Image (spheres, grey):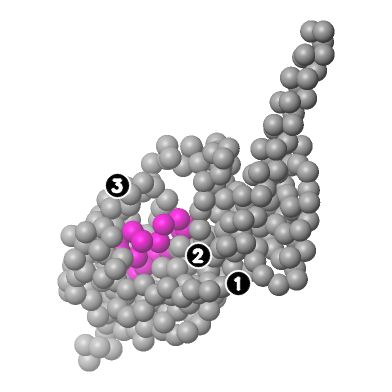
Amino acid sequence: MKKWIILMLVACVAASCGDSNSRYVRRAISLMDKHGLYAEGPAWEAARAEALAAKPDSLGAAYKITREALKVAGGKHSFIYKPKYVQKDLAREWENPSVRVEDGIVIIQVPAFSGSSEEASDYAWSTQDKIPDDVRGAVIDLRGNTGGNMGPMIASVHRFIQDDDILRFRGRDHFNAYHIRNICATFGITPGEQIDCPVAVLTDTLTASSGEAVLICFRGMPRARTFGMQTAGYASGNRTFDMPDGSKLVVTASCDVARTGEEFCDDPIAPDVPTETPLEDALAWLREQAASSSE
């Protein structure tokens, strides 16, 4: 009798786990249906049906099924963030931008950021009293910026961005525009007067996601030029959702649109000046601009 009871309990536990694994997939598919940039048409219908018909016997199998569907619904920028990585990021110490001035040119290193709201505010404010009003040029260094939260990044360098629709996101059924005033308001910053000077933006193959979004804010500005290497090609907007096991489902919901009307998403963004010495070349260009304007 005891053996039968144990076997029944094991069977019930197994059935419960199987149900939870299937629920994980069903919730993920529901979120992709609603938010996925590419979640429409025959390819998505086929991927959706295949995922819902699957019978995952473990959480790992549920992850695998979900990832396959994510490739179709959101493309390469969509992913599952496992609980251990979520906790690791929560414990991570994020760096604020660094600011230095050389020969009247301000150089701002803008690092990746995905911290808390308090850390985001500290990041956004960290440059506000360090940027002189009388600079002759600016370098916005986005090399190594793999992304995260674009808000504090943009706020930290907002005085060099020409205000307008600085960046837009186009989804399947929505179009959102961002302005300097809206982004700065998030961090309690009163937008400073724009510094009208030549701006050089530095990029490399690690510049991705929100790092690319900051780059796109300068797209179409008449006195801005980009130097370095092409970006990673993740210029799209993601939505993040909590999952029952503590993981997060990250679904690409929109592509980035510049003030020029250009759309960016999965393709790398090429610099105006391809170079292996971007800082040196940018400084040389900025000095030329300053010299010509003083003539």
Q: Amino acid at mark 1?
A: Asp
- Asked if labels 2 and 1 touch by Cβ distance under 8 angstroms, the answer is no
Q: CA distance from mark 2 to mark 3?
A: 22 Å
Tell me which corner region of the image, top left, top right, bottom left or bottom right, holds residue 103: bottom left
User: In percent of the image, x 19 and y 70: which residue is there?
Assistant: 192
Q: Amino acid at mark 2?
A: Gly
Say which element carries label 2: strand
Answer left or right for 157 relative to 87. Answer: left
User: In percent of the image, x 36 and y 79: which residue is there?
Assistant: 165
Which segment is the magenta one?
Answer: 139-156
Residue at numbered disc 2: 237
Residue 153 falls within the magenta-colored stretch: yes
| Residue depth check, mark 3 versus mark 1: number of the one nearer the observer | 3
Sort mark 3 into few (<14), some (14-19) or many (20+) by Cα contacts within 10 Å: few
Numbered circles on residues, count: 3
Q: CA distance from mark 1 to mark 2?
A: 14 Å
Sort mark 2 into few (<14), some (14-19) or many (20+) by Cα contacts within 10 Å: many
Quadrant, the C terminus: bottom left
Answer left or right for 91 relative to 33. Answer: left
Q: Which numbered disc flags the more N-terminal residue, 3 or 1?
A: 3
Residue at numbered disc 1: 267
Q: Position of residue 179 (x, y in %)?
A: 32, 73
Q: Decide: is 265 above or below 259.
A: above
- Asked if labels 1 and 3 touch by Cβ distance under 8 angstroms, the answer is no
